[in-house]
Image (cartoon, grey):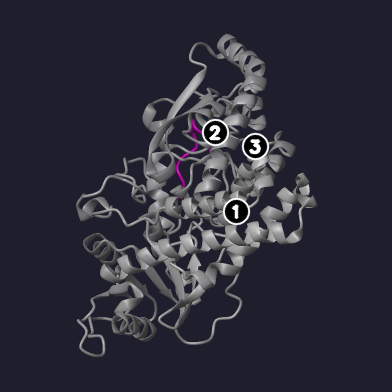
Amino acid sequence: MTAESTVPPPAGGSRAAVGAVSLLAPPGAATGTTPSTGRPSRRARRISWTPLLIADLSGTLLGALAVPEAQRYPLLIAFLGLSVLALNRQALLYDTPDVPGVLEELPAVCGRVAVGWAVVAALTSLRQLPMTVLGTACAVHCLVACVGREAVHGRRRRAFRRRPRPALVVGPFPAALRVAAALQRSPQCGTRPVGLVTDAPEPVPVPGDRPALPVLTSREEAHRALIQNGVETVLVVGPATRVQKAPMLRELAAFGCVLWELDADTPAYGLRGRRSRAGHLVGFSRRLLWPGSGPRGGRIGKRLLDLVLSGVLLLLAAPVLGVCAAVLRITEGPGVVFRQERIGKDGRQFTMLKLRTFRPASDHEAATRWSVADAEDMSRFCQFLRRTSLDELLQLWNVFRGDMSLVGPRPERTYFVTKFSQTLPGYPARHRMPTGMTGLAQINGLRGDTSIEDRCRFDNAYIDNWSLWQDICILTRTAMLFVRPTGS
């Protein structure tokens, strides 16, 4: 997608100005707003990692005190504590809305503690100690960590019983009603249904003496119920619902809701996956659905990668940018930097930078016209910049500032974001992550005048399956295909 535009808008498009961009509300936005803003009236309760981190670090400290020889290696003990925390983080023992029991976590916690102690013993003279001594230290570590974690989980379970988490149940009417009825019969589970998102025509009572639940048949009604009830949990009944209601579920996840998939009809097979946490809720098999925005630690890693690489690339590209800017100044006149408002993460606007390769007749033309990669009135040098994407190098400054990322969906102008959001249900979901200089769509040939629907699909697939390694692979493939016959 290009910044300056001369070709008419897509078929059926109009040059008239379009209304405000309809995007997901930014997570963590200020609360207490009205329903028209699309933001929750209060923040959903978040489970802090801190108590569990303290429990795990306390286990490390007391385990080391059980072995006097280990106290001579404070740095390695610190390494042990950080390693165990990293292993627990990778196993999703912190980043989960579930509140498990000590027996459920016992294998995962103790196994990672044992691995940590084995590594420390192999790196130091502790390997010369009797196995009983090392076993005792490992056992103390496990005992303290498990007792501490159970104390934290027990406190949280009691809090949820006193104040159950409000939940929306999404799915076919009979199955959703069955799940809601089971939840109302089991208040001790800590989850309270407040509405059914289904295709039923009218509200119906839940069997028994429980209060009736509203049936919500539109996205607007679901958003209103979320705001009014402070919904924190969404229960998705069946894998078919996950596909059919994907746009709505993405929006609910962007509001900060935790999504669980429940199997209300048949036994669940193969639910345990790399990023799944399986279990049950009042007897219904369930798994945690990740909205694809990436874990917090991953976002930090992504930002660090952006900072380091963009800083290095800016230094390396400075001579090239200087030469290009000088040639443009001589051949095209003043104003070699092109600035344009684009839509970034969570619908926020930012000013994107490029080398100017074309001068639109007006700001309106720049905002509402399409690609100019093959414009006949462009000089050969400007066409060269567009073909090789050298005009995009200034966006490294946007990445360094944090406006963009190196990898992500390409940013677009307000006019086209509004149009595409109205015609493509999944288009607003592209803004769940920072926009990027390159992305999965671009390395698959979707650059320039290509299908917006295909780009949208690739962009959402990138977000849903995001990993830091995927970013590195995309950057590598982009570097291999840097010189192209068409602009982006």
Q: Is residue 475 left or right of residue 291?
A: right
Q: Which mark is residue 486?
A: 3
Q: Residue at label 1?
A: 63
Q: Position of residue 153 (x, y in %)?
A: 42, 64
Q: Secondary structure at mark 1?
A: helix
Amino acid residing under circle 2: Val
Q: Which residue is mark 2?
A: 372
Query: What secondary structure prevails in the magenta region?
Result: loop
Residue in the foreground of this view, choosing between 116 and 217 = 116
Q: In this orientation, which residue lies closer to the viewer: 85 or 338? A: 85
Q: Position of residue 261 (x, y in %)?
A: 46, 72
Compute the Cα span from label 1 to label 3: 61 Å
| Identity, as a three-letter code, of the amino acid under mark 3 | Thr
How much space separates mark 3 and mark 2, taking CA atoms?
10 Å
Nearest to viewer (mark 1 / mark 2): 1
Q: Amino acid at mark 1?
A: Gly
